[in-house]
Image (spheres, grey):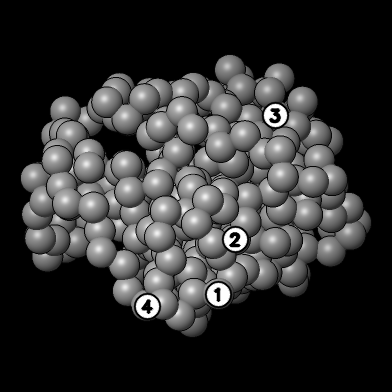
Amino acid sequence: MKRVIYNKVGGPEVLEIQEAPIPTIKKNEVLVRMLATSVNGGDLGLRRGDSKLVAKLSKYPQVMGIDVVGVVDQIGANVTDFKVGDKVWGNCGPNKGTTAEYFAVPASKIALLPDGLDPIKAAAILTAGITALTALIKDGKLKKGEKVLIRGAGGVGLTGVQIAKAHGAHVTALCSGATTDGVKASGADEVFDYHKTKLDELGQFDVIFDTVGTDFGTLRKHLTKNGRLETIAVSSFMGDIMSVFYGKHRTRLALGFSNHEILNYLAQMVNKREIVPVIDSVYPMEQIAEAHRRAEERGILGKIVIIIADK
């Protein structure tokens, strides 16, 4: 089978296609013939070597991708929830290697793909939706009528806007001028260009969801007394640790990993059209470097999806 790897950290040019054996599954795993995946921020950071410690400890080659959208090809001896031919979706931890023609995944990490949901759209929703649900609902405890600020208009930010609106929040978004129209179309009550509007002009919020790496000290000043700050962008690891113990408002790092419960909740929102995928662009696996280059540009609106197979 073909898969995407990199043998050293660096720019998108370090990514390459490699031939590898089809994975052998364990008793509790499912072999998925992959249809689509997506580019996530964690993929970019690992490939670039943003964490020098992680890069130093990594063994190469490293594989790429966390989103699983595909068709069940084999099931392990202990798997009872799925059968060969089922379309499934889910995700796993960073650098597990889902940008490949086949992927072995624990059955606990996947669920049946919602009826009628196109694999490309599923890949656009998947990790973005799980991450935003984790940040806003599971950890952030967002309530109806609360005010939420969402920083960023990538896949996670746009999905977060839709989730917050579906749960009855008043949503303010702060993004680049190039994406304001798209964010408004996703349902935000107020949208501001961060080049023209300062945080100090926006007031205070019950929940702030940062998807781009804004200074946490600055963001915490704009929380209400019982406000919660959720982030997926770790700009200062020590700052995050200190905020847990000493900060006026605790900062939580939202890690969006799948299980049956959250996937089924996400599927319900998709079926009710409370979440609609926003796709920036689609690339075949052979153009993974180009997809990463696009992901690192400014003004991205929505997700970048990678097609592995047509059907």
**Mark 2, residue position:** 111
**Helix, strand, or loop for circle 1?**
loop
* Residue denoted by label 3: 183
Provide the residue designation for mark 1.
Answer: 80
Q: CA distance from mark 3 to mark 2?
A: 29 Å
Q: Which residue type carries mark 2?
A: Ala
Q: Depth check: 134 or 66 in front?
A: 66
**Label 2 vs 4, first from the N-terminus:** 4
Total marks placed:
4
Q: Earlier in the sequence, mark 1 or mark 4?
A: 4
* N-term mark: 3 or 4: 4
As drawn, the label of residue 27 is 4
Is residue 124 found left or right of 169 in the rendered image?
Answer: left
Classify 10 Å Cα crowding around label 4: few (below 14), some (14-19), many (20 and above).
Answer: few
Q: Position of residue 252 (x, y in %)?
A: 54, 68
Quarter of the picture holding the N terminus: top left
Q: Earlier in the sequence, mark 3 or mark 2?
A: 2
**Label 3 sits on what residue type?**
Val
- Give the CA separation, mark 1 to mark 3: 41 Å
Circle 4: residue type = Lys
Q: Earlier in the sequence, mark 1 or mark 2?
A: 1
Of tags 3 and 4, the one toward the viewer is 4
Q: Determine which quarter of the picture holds residue 31.
A: bottom left
